Image: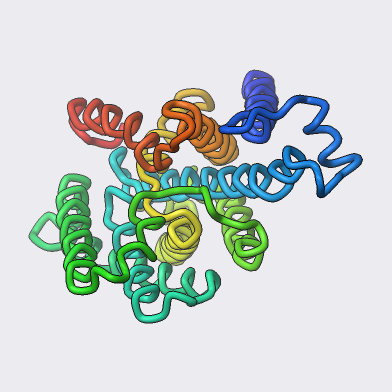
Amino acid sequence: MNKRNTILLLSMIVLLCAAFTASLLLGRTPITWGTLVKAFTDYDASNVEQLIVRTERLSRAVIALAVGACLALAGTLMQTMSRNPLASPDVFGVSSGAILMVVLAILVNPATPLLLLSLYAVGGAIIAAAIVYALGSLGRDGLTPVKLVLAGSAITALFASCTQAVLVMNEAGLQDVLFWLAGSISGRSLDNVLPLLPFIGAAALAALSMGRALNLLSTGEDVARGLGQRTGLVKLLLGALIVILAGGSVAIVGAVGFIGLFVPHMARGLAGNDYRWVLPFSALLGAALLLLSDVAARLLISPSEIPIGVMTAAVGVPFFIHVARKGGAWK
């Protein structure tokens, strides 16, 4: 066992716990430690602060933790499978495809249950991923990292334009979908999200178990096949996990970008190239960063709130430019 990585992993678990606690304590209404403890040990529904902790803050913290981990895992799987450091659900159009389908579903029926919305989101993610893969494979040299980025950027722009066109034709439904367009955790009840959590939780656990397979795949397809790996089947499974993780996340919080782009790089920088470590590092870092982003979104212009998608983009865009300037090639 790698002693250094074990210590780092434990440190990140502590960081995640601290971020989760900060999410419960900080916001428009400050919560004391005593109130926080009583909210779980001696709950009084007539106490406003305890009610905020149990009904609002806890829901936001759990959702941010789950979505952050899922997006980071999806990005790690995408970057490894495509051998492209710029790969992530939002860059490759997967998130925009999911958002378009969610918007269409909500405009047709604003009362669509979240579990059904997640199916629409996964369907949109699959369509986007298939189109990007097909476009990126055109030409003599086949699939390349550069063509994947170009195809993903084009499909992202196309689906974003389609989403805007749909909203222009139905301005009355704009308020119903602003939540998903901006990316936000506020206003989500844990009761509404709970039916979806087992599915994305199972996908996350399956992704965490793919470390050995990703280690083989990262050596190159020819080498992996020579060592007995069925690379086609592995890629199909990775693709399925990516669309479930990304589509489910979009159905819950909307357009939260760049977590899947820069967190895998941070995880590899800390853990090295062994994906048995990189995957749990990515999940923990993604969860902690989205929790901290949500806290910052509440505090920066309090009592108003910044959409969490804006907070993650503020960090992600400079990182995207940095990686692109390095050449955008897999290292």
Q: Is residue 9 visible?
A: no
Q: For this view, does 252 lie left or right of residue 330?
A: right
Q: Along the horizontal axis of the image, is 225 left or right of 280?
A: left
Q: Is residue 121 left or right of residue 17?
A: left
Seen in the picture, residue 225 relative to 321 is either above or below; the reply is: below
The residue sitting at 65% across, 34% down in the picture is 20
Residue 127, above or below 71: below
User: In this view of the protein, which residue sits in the foreground, 195 or 50?
Assistant: 50
Please identify the quarter of the rendering in which residue 219 is found.
top left
**Residue drawn where x is 69% and y is 50% of the image:** 55
- Decide if residue 93 is in sight here: yes
Q: How is the image coloured?
A: rainbow
Picture quarter with the N terminus: top right
Which residue sits at x=42%, y=68%? 122
The answer to whether residue 303 is left or right of residue 79 is right
Residue 311 x, y percent position in the rendering: 39, 34
